[in-house]
Image (cartoon, rainbow, N blue to C red):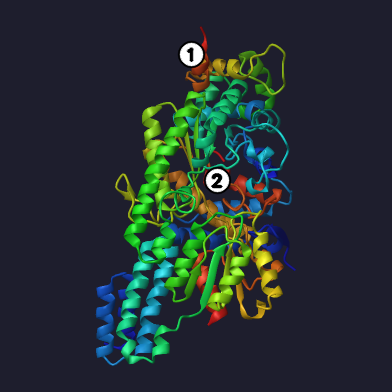
Amino acid sequence: MATEYKLRMGDGKRIFMTKEQIVADLKEGMADAADLGSIPDLSEDELDKLVDIITMPSRMVGVEQGKEVPVTHDIGTIRIDGDQGNSGVGIPSSRLVGAMMHERAFGADTMELGHIDYSYKPAKPVIAQEMQTMEICQQNMIVPMLYGAMPNMGLYYTPDGPFENPGDLMKAFKIEEARQSMEHSAEHLTRDIVWIMQRMMASGSDGVNFDTVGAAGDGDMYASLHAIEALRKQFPDIYIEAGMAGELMLGMHGELEYDGTTLAGLWPHEQAPLVAKAGANVFGPVCNTNTSKSAAWNLGRAVTFIKAAVKASPIPCHVNMGMGVGGIPMLETPTIDAVSRASKAMVEIAGVDGI
Amino acid sequence: MGMPISHIMTSGMSGIRAAGDLVARMELAKGMRIGEAKDYVAKKLDVTTDDLSDEYVMRELREELGIGVITSVAGAPKGIAAKMNIEKLLDLKINSCEKFRGQLK
Amino acid sequence: MSNEEMFKELADAVVTCKKDVVTAAVEKARSEGIPAPEIIEKGLAAGMNEVGVLFERGKLFLPHVMMAAGAMEEGVKLLEADMPKDAVTKKLGVIVNGTVEGDVHDIGKAIVSTMLQSAGFEVHDIGRDVPLQNFIDKIKETNADMVGLSALMTTTLQGQKDVIEMLKENGMRDNVKVMVGGAPATQAWAEKIGADCYAENASEAVVKAKELLL
């Protein structure tokens, strides 16, 4: 009987697979990414290495010594005091305490300040609180500390915002009206992000993290890129990190362009140069986890996508490796064996500059 | 919380336990890729790139350089003071330090 | 031109997303004596399936999906005279779709609604942050065959289970299929709460809806 190895499904459930089955799934996942993105397959050596990483008997694996990379932190301190909706663990503490715990106790390489609602728009009414907290954190922290939130352009559509919901307009075949609504929302989103970051920079922030760019489609990315461009112009030394929401830029509008490139339909390796062009310092590519496939399939696919993005990017790539992305299972408590293997694979095979 | 800690243990540079914050800062400040950032920091610290993730090497060196350590060593630079030393060491300006200097009379 | 070639031309016409191209192809197919149901099923509907595939692959975008659906509707209108009235107006099924109460995420659910609508289902999108009773009321009002329940947060997933329980309490569960989706939802979750299916994305939602309702 062939030896079976312990793996995970994309939803985290334990499964057992033979080496042949693992190789087959790796190749299938890789082929899916290569086909969708029109990007190269992994080499035989890289596939062999992925098999080695997946089949290592130890629960936790690690990168080879000397190959370590910085681990940046989206959502920041909310992980400590946040609620289940933010994947927080609900420990009553200030955000300063959360930031210092990450720096001094957990060994985080960077940190981020974010507010509990974690979108830019709702930060406006509480901006004084955010500025005050940033100042206090900066006085006490040593690692780079960004202000982070989600662009989340959906907040500008009815019933949450002033512009008619493009989803409703689209379903009524009002395509031009839907597009105009997205364009107006994008203008407001850009303006809000710049306004907030002007104040956070005045409070000593090292910079900004755009978390989940494109969550509301190409309009969301359009607004984010213009905000990046404006912030780079206004603050030449600002640290700008831009992480994506998903692997494919959804075409809600379909015709928005940045620097002559249509945003809709871009894959990670096509997104990276645009984000760099806008003025970001670090790009966060994403590959979504399919919960109905094995860890081997997901990792083969994710490493193929991210390797191509790392190669195409002129700036450092910090791959998104949270719940349900980057080969990590879609589970509130992602299993350490799966996280550790995905993490090692991204560093050693995809060649990421950070996580 | 388990997930970021798993990443740090698997792949991270350990922040101020070693020199992860310095390498991350060069990536963020100058858009340096990982190899370039490690080379830059290693040269400034006069250590090897492997040493940047080595807690043994970095613990003493960080205290000597006054760039912050994880334990609360009395009298050693912390927060803004440590970052001011990092500015000199890495030859860059840090926004919070600039703002701090701007507040001094 | 063979029938197969004509079906391909019809499908390609839908993929152009242009009404005039679709209607010209339909007129041509009629003039060649191809029965209306075949023009729709083997030509236009096949084209819409192709549009769905291209959307998933990032080659076509949401406005194109709607334009293609609009173009197909125009084509079907031309065939009305050749078909029994109920055959023209009959939808694949009636689906109530919404994001459960407490969850304000709208966009993924809206894409699913659009894809289902463009595939030929009658879709009633009742929005996001929808009080659970509203799902029951809308299903009754529209005599829906299926309900789509979206949740994007681990904290709101429970709403999907609650709606299934409410369907049972109202004696409606046997007549209404339940589809669940959203980032934290999984096949295992769908099985655990007794949903009929889980869809990973909008294209899969269309495939699963067809499997369950046709």
Q: Give the percent coordinates (x, y) of residue A276.
A: 40, 39
Q: Amino acid at mark 1?
A: Gly
**Residue plotted at (40% across, 40% down):** A190
Q: Please indicate whether residue B71 sits to the left or right of residue A118 in the image.
A: right
Q: Give the percent coordinates (x, y) of residue A11.
A: 65, 59
**Residue plotted at (27% across, 80% down):** C25
Q: Chain of mark 1?
A: B
Same subunit under labels 2 and 1? no
Q: Please indicate whether residue A171 sits to the left or right of residue C12 in the image.
A: right
Which sits in the foreground, A50 or B63?
B63
- Tell me if residue C61 can be seen: no
**Residue plotted at (65% across, 28% down):** A96
Q: Residues within 10 Å of mark 2 (few under 14, many from 20)?
A: many
Q: Quadrant of residue A139?
A: top right
* In the depicted structure, whether residue A136 falls above or below residue A11: above
**Separation of marks 2 and 1 at Cα, in angstroms:** 36 Å
According to the image, label 1 marks what residue? Answer: B102
Q: Quadrant of the N terminus of chain C?
A: bottom left
Q: Chain of mark 2?
A: A
Q: Nearer the viewer, mark 2 or mark 1?
A: 1
- Tell me if residue C23 can be seen: yes
According to the image, label 2 marks what residue? Answer: A320
At mark 1, the secondary structure is helix
Which sits in the foreground, A169 or A133?
A169
Q: Give the percent coordinates (x, y) of residue A142.
A: 60, 23
Q: Residues within 10 Å of mark 1 (few under 14, many from 20)?
A: few
At mark 2, the secondary structure is loop
Q: Amino acid at mark 2?
A: Asn
- Marks counted in the figure total 2
* In the depicted structure, whether residue B66 falls above or below residue A18: above
Q: Give the percent coordinates (x, y) of residue C115.
A: 45, 68
